Image (cartoon, helix red, strand yellow):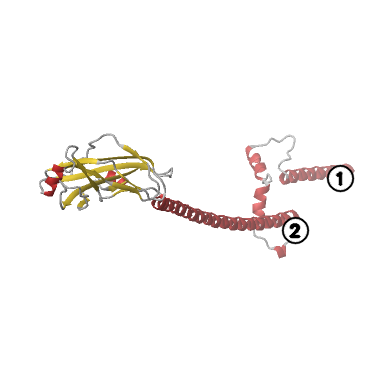
Amino acid sequence: MDEHNDSGHGANNTRDSSERSQREVISNPLQRAPNQQTTAADEQKISHHTKPILGIRLWRTLVRPRKWRNVSHVNWVEKATLIVAILVLGVTTKQALIYSRQADLMEASVGQNERAVVLNQGQLHGMIESNRINREAMEVVQGAVISFSPGVKATEVFSPTDSGKVVDWQLSVPFSNDGNTATKNGQVNWSGRTMKKTIPDNYAFPDVDPEAGPFALGPKQSVQTRPLLVPVGAIQNVLERREHLYLYGWATYRDRFTWTPNRRTEFCYEMVRVSSLPLMEKIPVTDIEFVLCKHHNCYDDECEASK
């Protein structure tokens, strides 16, 4: 009887131990009986029950719907993680707003700088233009300006054998410095020509004497060109309208400003009236008139443009 009971208790104990082992194996698939082998299906179950990474758990914690009132047990780690995530999100949002505001301020500052650059460029161009105008005004007001005059001076030249007979006229052209500064490196040359017809438009105005003479004039000073002898017969032909008498020439010089270029003045005059000829008497020649020619009267860059 006792043996039978002991045998029954042993069988019960063996059955209980086997059931516990099976439950442990089912509850923890990582544990296997020594005589059991791990299959592919078991490995898939093991990998399925592997704990996910922290990021996935945090995402599941944030998106998983919860009924907070019905929860009897609070996971404090998840709650703290959720609070930290909310705080980080708030701080990140605040920083994004701050950065956005800073970007707006920087954009406004860039716009102001661009406007300031445009304004400064305009001011710079204005200063340059003002400086140019002031220089030009100084050149006009203070610079040397050589001008020729049609008030030609004529003097009779008498015969050395007959003191009462005029054989030539001595002509000279007055020119002056109309500026307020002296000239530098002045050179002047002029010529006289008689022609049967009026001077043509394409006339080159060649120098009769290739050698120019130097001059230097102070402010508001005047002087005469070297005299040019014209036979009294040519003057008689002009008086009788058979010929034309032309006087022409040029002057080059510099003024006292270092930034200005070389200056040039050209002139051409025609004799148009002679009232009488003092051929036999020593009478001053006063009643003559010269006028400007159609060409070859210019200043500086105008002279280049007229050629």
Res 214 quadrant in image: top left
| Amino acid type shown at disc 1 | Asn
Separation of residues labelled 2 and 1 (CA atoms): 50 Å
Residue located beneath label 1 in the image? 5
Q: Looking at the image, which residue is at 22% across and 38% down?
A: 206
Residue located beneath label 2 in the image? 74
Q: Looking at the image, which residue is at 17% across and 37% down?
A: 161
Mark 2, mark 1: which one is toward the viewer? 2
Res 256 quadrant in image: top left
Q: Is residue 141 visible?
A: yes
Report crowding for label 2: few under 14, some 14 to 19, many 20 or more residues within 10 A (C-alpha): few
Q: Position of residue 186 (x, y in %)?
A: 35, 40
Position of 134 with respect to 45 (left or right) is left
| Amino acid type shown at disc 2 | Val
Q: Position of residue 253 (x, y in %)?
A: 36, 42
Q: Position of residue 133 (x, y in %)?
A: 41, 53
Provide the secondary structure element on which disc 2 rests.
loop
Q: Earlier in the sequence, mark 2 or mark 1?
A: 1
Q: Looking at the image, which residue is at 64% across and 52% down?
A: 59
Q: Position of residue 210 (x, y in %)?
A: 26, 34
Q: Is residue 262 visible?
A: no
